[in-house]
Amino acid sequence: MKLNDLQRRGGRRKARELVFRALYESGVTRDSLLEIMELSLGKFRLTMEGREYALQLTAACEQGLEPIDQVISSVLKSWDAERLGLVERAILRLAGVELKWQTAIDARIILDEAVRLATRYGSDESPAFVNGVLDPIARHFRPGELEGDAGGA
C-alpha cells in the first residue's frame, strides 16, 4: 500500500471518528450537528482530505437522517429504534450515510470502520450488534456488493 493510500485511509478514519462524536454529542445535547462540527474541526487534527471527508459526511447528515433512520428501523423490526443507545445510533447513522452516499468506498470498509468505532466506544455487545444491523443495511443500499461474503449466500 502506498503512503498516500495510508494517509487517505487514516484521514477518513479520523474524519469518521469526528463525525461520529459530533452525531453522539448532537444526540445528547440536541445541538445542531453543523455547529458541533464547526467547533470540533479546529480541535481535531485532520489532514486536508480528512477535513473534506468530515465536511462531506456532515453535509450528508444535514441533508437528512430520516431515510437512514427508516432503513435502520426496518432492519430492527421488533425493536423500537428509539431504544437504541446513543453510541450505537450514531455509529449506525454514520455508516448508513456512508453506505448511501459514499459509493466510492467499499461497503466492507465502511462496516469494518463502524465495528471499530463500536469496539472503541460501545459496550461489549456493541460490535456484534452494529455488525448484525449494518449487514442488511449495506445490502439495502449496495445490492450485490457484499455477495460472495458468508452472509450473502
Image (spheres, grey):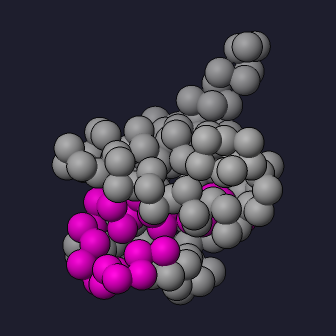
Dominant secondary-structure state across the stretch colored magenta: helix
Examine the rendered structure and indicate whether residue 153 appears above or below residue 49.
below
Q: Quadrant of residue 87?
A: bottom left
Q: Which residues are magenta?
A: 75-101
> What residue is at 51 percent from the left and 59 percent from the top?
134
Q: Residue at x 42, y 44 (%)?
A: 115
Foreground: 108 or 1?
A: 108
Q: Answer with left or right where residue 123 lies relative to residue 44.
A: left
* Residue shown at 65% from the left, 21% from the top: 6
Outermost residue to the left? 123
Q: Is residue 3 left or right of residue 39?
A: right
Residue 15 position, x and y percent, is 52, 46
Q: Is residue 27 magenta?
A: no
- Is 81 contained in the magenta span? yes
* Image height of 16 relative to 112, above or below: below
94 in relation to 7, above or below: below
**On-image quarter of the N terminus:** top right
Q: Position of residue 17 (x, y in %)?
A: 43, 46
Which of the 4 image quarters holds residue 60? bottom right
Disc tally is 0
In the rendered image, the vertical position of residue 139 relative to residue 149, given as above or below: below
Decide if residue 57 is in sight here: no
Q: Position of residue 143 (x, y in %)?
A: 77, 62
* Image position of 139 (left or right of 117): right
**Which of the 4 image quarters holds residue 149?**
top right
**Image coordinates for residue 3, horizontal then vertical, percent:** 71, 14
- Whether residue 112 is visible to the viewer of this picture, yes or no, is yes
- Relative horizontal placement of residue 92, taking residue 87 as reference (left or right): right
Instruction: Determine the residue positioned at 59% across, 83% down.
Output: 67
Q: Residue furthest top?
A: 2
